[in-house]
């Protein structure tokens, strides 16, 4: 049976042991995430392994927007014709190598979408900028559409998650 994970905001949890295999993502969690939180630039959420209390994975969320002409016409036709559409940016998503292969990425993605849906700020899309083609494939597997102009950028209507959660 898989060890359960507890999702919570990044606080004083020990970060030194975290290693996702990507130096930039490791450095961000260890050195930059706290500063971004204090400055109000992003929020960081972590999955804590219930057995070891280690950070098993993390993601960041921040506000952003998409230009209407960046959105495929099949999605844009359902939206008001404003020049910009509000979105939540999934800035980073990383899983410690000790916990990879347990579908934790999907759990973090779902948690991010639910937090964006519960926000008191209107958000239409969840946006993710993949750093690698493997990350892009992960987002496509979970229903994200690639941006035709920026292939590693992906987005999905938050309504997709609302329907899956029984909220719409």
Image: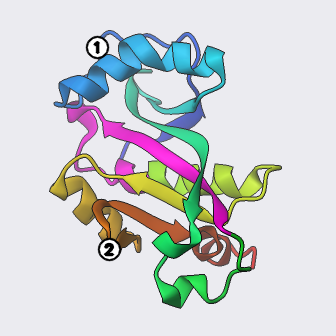
- Lateral position of residue 36 relative to residue 79, left or right: left
Disc number lying in front (2 or 1)? 2
Which residue in the protein does label 1 denote? 17
Give the residue at x 20% y 33%: 97
Mark 1 falls on what kind of element? loop
Which residue in the protein does label 2 denote? 148
Asked whether residue 76 is drawn in magenta, I would say: no
Please say whether residue 142 is visible from this viewpoint.
Answer: yes
Q: Position of residue 7 (x, y in %)?
A: 56, 37
The magenta segment is: 83-107
Vertical relation: 129 (above or below) 14: below
Query: How far, Cα to Cα, is label 2 from label 1?
Result: 38 Å
Give the residue at x 51% y 90%: 74
For marks 2 and 1, the one nearer the N-term is: 1
Dot 2: few (<14), some (14–19), or many (≥20) neighbours within 10 Å? few
**Circles 2, 1 touching at the beta carbon (< 8 Å):** no
Give the residue at x 59% y 16%: 11
């Amino acid at each position: 049976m898989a060890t359960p994970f507890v999702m919570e905001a990044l606080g004083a949890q020990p970060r030194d042991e975290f290693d996702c295999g990507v130096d930039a993502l490791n450095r961000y969690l260890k050195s930059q995430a706290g500063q971004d939180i204090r400055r109000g630039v992003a929020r960081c959420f972590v999955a804590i392994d219930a057995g070891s209390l280690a950070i098993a994975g993390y993601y960041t969320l921040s506000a952003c927007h998409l230009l209407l002409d960046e959105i495929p016409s099949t999605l844009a036709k359902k939206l008001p014709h404003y020049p910009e559409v509000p979105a939540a940016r999934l800035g980073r998503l990383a899983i410690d190598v000790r916990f990879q292969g347990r579908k934790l990425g999907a759990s973090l993605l779902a948690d991010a979408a639910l937090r964006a849906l519960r926000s008191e700020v209107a958000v239409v899309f969840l946006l993710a900028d993949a750093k690698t083609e493997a990350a892009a494939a992960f987002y496509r597997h979970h229903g994200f559409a690639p941006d035709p102009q920026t292939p590693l950028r992906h987005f999905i209507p938050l309504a997709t998650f609302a329907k899956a959660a029984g909220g719409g």
